[in-house]
Image (cartoon, helix red, strand yellow):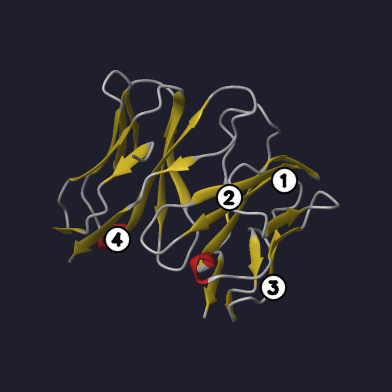
Amino acid sequence: GAGVSQSPRYKVAKRGQDVALRCDPISGHVSLFWYQQALGQGPEFLTYFQNEAQLDKSGLPSDRFFAERPEGSVSTLKIQRTQQEDSAVYLCASSLRRRGGTNEKLFFGSGTQLSVL
Amino acid sequence: QKEVEQDPGPLSVPEGAIVSLNCTYSNSAFQYFMWYRQYSRKGPELLMYTYSSGNKEDGRFTAQVDKSSKYISLFIRDSQPSDSATYLCAMRALIQGAQKLVFGQGTRLTINP
């Protein structure tokens, strides 16, 4: 596909369950970002990869959140022992340019809507 | 207090009206300013970006930045029902290693036919 693909589109989890959210960036895109968007709020930064290197994980809210991009393409965001406050849309975005690029355009996926009951 | 403040609305205007959307920010390091549009159940898409103070025009859209007041605006002329969406301002510092965008809360806009 031409855009950023995220799966699943919707995920319902029971509190305490582990979940894994997948992001397929645009082919050839070097940079990959994860954002969390709560209902009625703007996206909030979680973490950033350049190829397989996780260069910034300052936005991850707790050690229950873990992200990886082992081969520099597909990325997975894992949330362990989910809690109700984790309910949100998780957005993935990718861009072509390397770190330091100033006007790189971010392409967002449609997100995974996570509901923790 | 959030680094970027944006009135969430909702804002409802008739078709053809001029729409003004605004954000204020507190971090002087922000030098790169963007406006995104987000339709329901979709990811944000970039509308406009600018680095400098002043105006930047693209079709019916004009982005305005006033760094001295830490205030940015987006104007939409001849608004259309298809412009109905949530509009997010976003900004970033232009320093080594600063990649993350900081978003406003988003303003929900409805254009009534």
B67 or A45, nearer to the observer: A45
Mark 3 or 4: the one toward you: 3
Please determine whether, in this image, residue B20 is positioned above or below residue A80: above
Identify the residue at the far top of this view: B68
Q: Which chain carries label 1?
A: A
Are dots 2 and 1 in contact, CB under 8 Å? Answer: yes
CA separation in Å, label 2 and label 4: 20 Å
- Label for residue B94? none
* Residue furthest right as drawn: A71
Mark with earlier residue (2, 3) = 3
Q: What residue type is labelled 2?
A: Phe
Q: Nearer the viewer, residue A110 or A86?
A: A86
Horizontal side, residue B54 vs residue B99: left or right: left
Mark identifier at residue B84: 4
Disc 3 target residue: A18
Three-letter amino acid code at the position of disc 1: His
Cα separation between marks 3 and 1: 28 Å
The residue tagged with tag 1: helix, strand or loop?
loop
Mark 4–mark 1 Cα distance, whole angstroms, equals 30 Å
The residue positioned 61% from the left and 70% from the top of the image is: A82
Tell me if label 3 and label 4 are in contact, CB under 8 Å: no
- Which mark sits nearer the N-terminus, 3 or 1? 3
| Amino acid type at mark 4 | Ser
Mark 2 = which residue? A107
Residue at 44% over, 61% down: A38
Identified by mark 3, the residue type is Asp
Residue behind mark 1 = A29
Q: Is residue B90 above or below residue B45?
A: above
Q: Which of the two marks, 3 or 1, is nearer to us in this view? A: 3
